[in-house]
Amino acid sequence: MTYLDRDFRIVWVNAAVLHNFGRPPEYFIGKRCFEVIEGRDGPCPGCAVAKTFESQKPETGEVVSRNGIIWLQKAYPIFDEAGRVARVVEISRNVTEEKRALERIQYLTFHDPLTGCYNRRFFQEELKRLDTPRQLPLSITMADVNNLKLVNDAFGHRKGDELLQKVARILSSSRRTEDLVVRWGGDEFLVLLPRTPAAVVQEIMERTRKRCAEESQKGERHVRISVALGCATKEKDEDLLQVINEAEVQMYRDKFADARIVRHLTLLSLEQSLREIPGEMETHCQRLRVLARKMGVALGLSQKDLEALDLLARLHDLGKLGISRDLLAKPRPLTDAEWEEIRRHPEIGYRMAQVFPELAPVAEGILTHHERFDGTGYPQGLKGEEIPLLARIIAIVDAFDTMTSDRPHRKALTVKEALEYIRENAGTQFDPDLVALFLSMLEEPKNPSPRKEVGRVYPPHPQ
């Protein structure tokens, strides 16, 4: 509590003020409150004391100190014999935490907590203000995030959330100051553009597409950032909900029209990312394609099956994109827990493949290429011919090439050692008939490479 005269000089302060500021009474008495407390040249904005001197009645005010503390003030006039306000009693209370909590509640009431965009509730309230003739033409843009399901299934919902946040930032940076970006649904956003003709909306949408492409080249590039866009404009007295519906229809048309292109570009991005994984992934893939085709031709597979086998050779390890690169590149032997993490990649790859109709012929092969002929493989424990033929082929050629190539956690075996391992594991890890075919295709070299150590114990092929 503080007593002040008409010149805002402090006449008296109570013990609470002294304790709060840690100062003796003489620090305050006789000095103007705004000078000694706030270091200002005049009364603070919102000061209740100034209001009371002017209105001659009790007033309430809110003052924000230079250090960010918010004070709720109540001021009461003290009249002299002539009926004038001679002094004011001012009581202040620190309401900083209360105000911040209230602001947080208000923020969450009208904002999406994940992206920071306005939410649907705010949009519905804002329509009452904006849906007026003076805001015409009033345009609506609808945006749907492509590949969100793929990202969630392959890399986890945290990465999916990051994709939504990136799209929200792109939409916000592409708009003008007066436009509103709204999180409309799970993977949908709405942009409200007052006093905006259709031609300007088209320019903003093109800017959005360009920034999506630019953002896709930054950081992790597993999946391209892209959105399907649609727009509609209210130019006369009509139901705005109908305009929103029209924008949504246009957005879905854009999504379906470009679906094949989006999937194709996404697959290219995924395959490129797969080739960047440590461990000679690009050359490993090329060698697998050659070996797999030789086996496929020897088996008399149809052209359709040969194409599927080639696709499986390229993408059988697709799920490794969902595994930490640090783990895949670890130079030391892996722990049991780390092997368990790596063994998740067939299921991750299978979920990713299901997003693409183009990968339907190889989805099962991606899932089962680490099954073993004796039923002790993973993830399903399939046995014998329960395992798809293409997966049984890839299991052999993948094992051979992996064993004869250096890996972060071990050195390569010789061709002779690798072939011996495959021969010894026919009927357990590998299909024995396919092993016989594979061995007949590859003649064992007469002189093993001198840099390889012959006669060591064969390590199990990393499954």
Image (cartoon, rainbow, N blue to C red):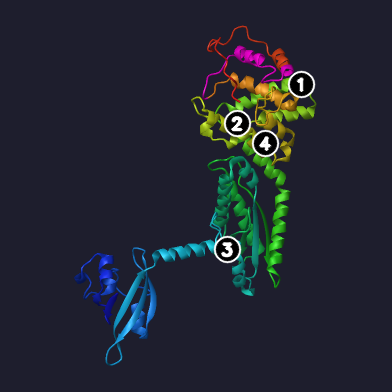
**Among the 4 quarters of the image, the one containing residue 400:** top right
Q: Which residue is mark 2?
A: 343
Dots 2, 3 in contact, CB < 8 A:
no
**Above or below, comparing residue 398 to residue 255 in the picture:** above
Q: Which residue is mark 1?
A: 297
The quadrant the N terminus occupies is bottom left
First in sequence: mark 1 or mark 4?
1
Inspect the image, locate mark 3, and give the three-letter code of the amino acid beneath it.
Asp
First in sequence: mark 3 or mark 1?
3
Question: Where does the image place residue 456, in percent across and percent down from the top left?
Answer: 54, 12
Inspect the image, locate mark 2, and give the three-letter code of the amino acid beneath it.
Arg
Question: Where does the image place residue 176, in percent across and percent down from the top left?
Answer: 56, 61
Q: Describe the element under mark 4 as helix, strand or loop.
A: helix
Which residues fall within the magenta stretch? 408-434
Dots 1, 2 in contact, CB < 8 A:
no
Q: Which residue is mark 3?
A: 179
Question: Where does the image place residue 40, in percent across and percent down from the top left?
Answer: 30, 70
Residue under the image location 35 percent in, 84 percent down: 54
Residue under the image location 68 percent in, 63 percent down: 244
Dots 2, 4 in contact, CB < 8 A:
no
> Which of labels 1 and 2 is toward the front?
2
Q: CA distance from mark 1 to mark 4?
A: 26 Å
Q: Is 17 on the left-hand or right-hand side of 124?
A: left
Inspect the image, locate mark 1, and give the three-letter code of the amino acid beneath it.
Val
First in sequence: mark 3 or mark 4?
3
Inspect the image, locate mark 4, and give the three-letter code of the amino acid beneath it.
Tyr
The quadrant the C terminus occupies is top right
> Which of labels 3 and 1 is toward the front?
1
Nearest the viewer among 352 and 343 is 343
